[in-house]
Image (cartoon, rainbow, N blue to C red):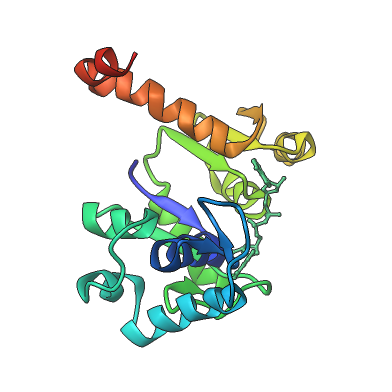
Amino acid sequence: MQALLGGNAIAVHDIEQSLMGTSLGMDMKRGVSVRGGHRHHLKAINTICRCGSIAQAVEQGVLTTGIFYECIHKGVPFSLAGSIRDDGPLPDTKMNLLEAQADYARLIQGADMILMLSSMLHSIGVGNMTPAGVKMVCVDINPAVVTKLSDRGSVESIGVVTDVGLFLSLLVQQLSKLTSPYQVSQTV
Ligand SMILES: NC(=O)c1ccc[n+]([C@@H]2O[C@H](COP(=O)([O-])OP(=O)(O)OC[C@H]3O[C@@H](n4cnc5c(N)ncnc54)[C@H](O)[C@@H]3O)[C@@H](O)[C@H]2O)c1
């Protein structure tokens, strides 16, 4: 993966899960809400604000797991485009949309394939700025989103109507077959 494009939500939910094991106060392992969990979302945002940024939270040893920890750790660039729905927002989220669009356009330069995973807003935005010939795979549980993307001109996109969790676990299985045949023979 060469870059990650998203909004405030993916980072806030990922960071809440990394720091407290919850998403909007729901325990992600047990699927139940935890006592005082309603505070976790804002606590996660405030923690990152105090550190200065997601990268600084990783440097300071505050954030030690999760998608954004891995991005910083492995040097994968990311861009978070803001919206009016955002809580906080995080210091990394770009609230100037022209700057965010320019950042997205820079990061998709030279991309062969773009995976669009359960974000209608960002998928259609990226679809609009992607040149012809780039493969796009749009995964969403709502068939209307996949259709909307094609209707707006991203006709080359392949739509997969499914749960994104299921898609990602199958993708990981297939990728590990390509990269680690030993590991697969052990687990089959
Ligand atoms: N805490 C926050 O700050 C916060 C929270 C939520 C959203 N937002 C912001 O609001 C904007 C829009 O948010 P969004 O991208 O979440 O909404 P969106 O409506 O653009 O996209 C969500 C998509 O996910 C799909 N979906 C839902 N469950 C799925 C599943 N299990 N498998 C596959 N697809 C599934 C839906 O059909 C929908 O198309 C963004 O800018 C986001 O950052 C912010």
- Comparing 7 with 61, the one in front is 61
Quadrant of the image where one finds ligand 1: bottom right
Q: Would you say residue 95 is visible in this rendering?
A: no
Residue at the (31%, 18%) spot, across then down: 187
From the viewer's perspective, is 92 left or right of 2? right
- Comparing 116 with 125, the one in front is 116
Residue at the (42%, 73%) spot, across then down: 92
- Comparing 7 with 17, the one in front is 17
Q: Position of residue 140 (x, y in %)?
A: 66, 38
Is 28 placed above or below 157 here? below
Residue at the (50%, 67%) spot, across then down: 12
Q: Would you say residue 31 is visible in this rendering?
A: yes
Farthest right residue? Answer: 144
Q: Position of residue 125 (x, y in %)?
A: 62, 52
Q: Quadrant of residue 175?
A: top left
Residue at the (60%, 35%) spot, across then down: 138
Q: Quadrant of residue 151?
A: top right
Q: Quadrant of the N terminus?
A: top left
Is 42 placed above or below 125 here? below
- Comparing 45 with 126, the one in front is 45
Count numbered badges in the picture.
Answer: 0
From the viewer's perspective, is 26 left or right of 182? right
Farthest bottom residue? Answer: 50
Q: Position of residue 139 (x, y in %)?
A: 61, 35
Q: Quadrant of residue 141?
A: top right
Q: Quadrant of the C terminus?
A: top left
Q: Position of residue 88 (x, y in %)?
A: 55, 81
